[in-house]
Image (cartoon, helix red, strand yellow):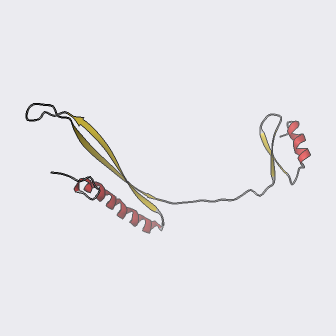
């Protein structure tokens, strides 16, 4: 009997059914938790084993036996993001110790900043 290599074929029915189950669970959780984004993924790992069975004449025949393993996963995307900008006018200088320091242009002029950095005040 010949089997097709297609996700729509009987060969991959267990994998497709697993994706269907994950999708149902995911959609239910998304509705319950009021989440607007999610995903379901299917990973199929394929390996080929080389075998040498004997034919009816006792001769070895090289064949390849495929093995398919599947894994499904569902993920709900919950984003918590904040963004902003520090609205200070900083200048970055290196102190005498070689470490960086920031000075505000609002409180120090450039000459003071360079002097403090050279004295190790940075």
Q: Residue at x 29, y 56 (%)?
A: 7
In the image, taking residue 59 as reference, residue 83 lies left or right, namely: right
Q: Please, is residue 75 above or below residue 36 in the view?
A: above
Q: Residue at x 85, y 39 (%)?
A: 117
Residue 37: x and y, percent?
47, 63
Rendered-image quadrant of the C terminus:
top right
**Left or right: where 33 falls relative to 66:** right
Estimate the x, y position of residue 104 in percent, counting from the top left. 83, 51
The image shows residue 44, relative to residue 118, as above or below, that is below
The image position of residue 66, as x and y in percent, is: 25, 43
Q: Residue at x 36, y 62 (%)?
A: 23
Depth check: give the residue in front, 9 or 122: 9
Quarter of the view holding residue 27: bottom left
Quadrant hosting residue 100: top right
Residue drawn where x is 49% and y is 59% of the image? 77
Q: Position of residue 118 (x, y in %)?
A: 87, 37
């Amino acid at each position: 009997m010949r089997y097709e290599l297609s996700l729509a074929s009987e060969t991959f029915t267990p994998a497709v059914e697993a994706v269907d189950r994950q999708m149902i669970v995911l959609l239910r959780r998304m509705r319950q938790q009021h989440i607007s984004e999610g995903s379901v993924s299917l990973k199929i790992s394929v390996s080929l084993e080389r075998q040498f069975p004997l034919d009816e004449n006792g001769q070895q025949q090289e064949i390849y036996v495929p093995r398919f393993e599947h894994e499904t996963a569902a993920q709900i995307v919950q984003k918590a993001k904040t963004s902003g900008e520090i609205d200070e006018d900083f200048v970055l200088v290196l102190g005498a110790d070689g470490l960086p320091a920031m000075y505000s242009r609002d409180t120090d002029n450039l000459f003071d900043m360079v002097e403090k950095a050279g004295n190790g005040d940075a």
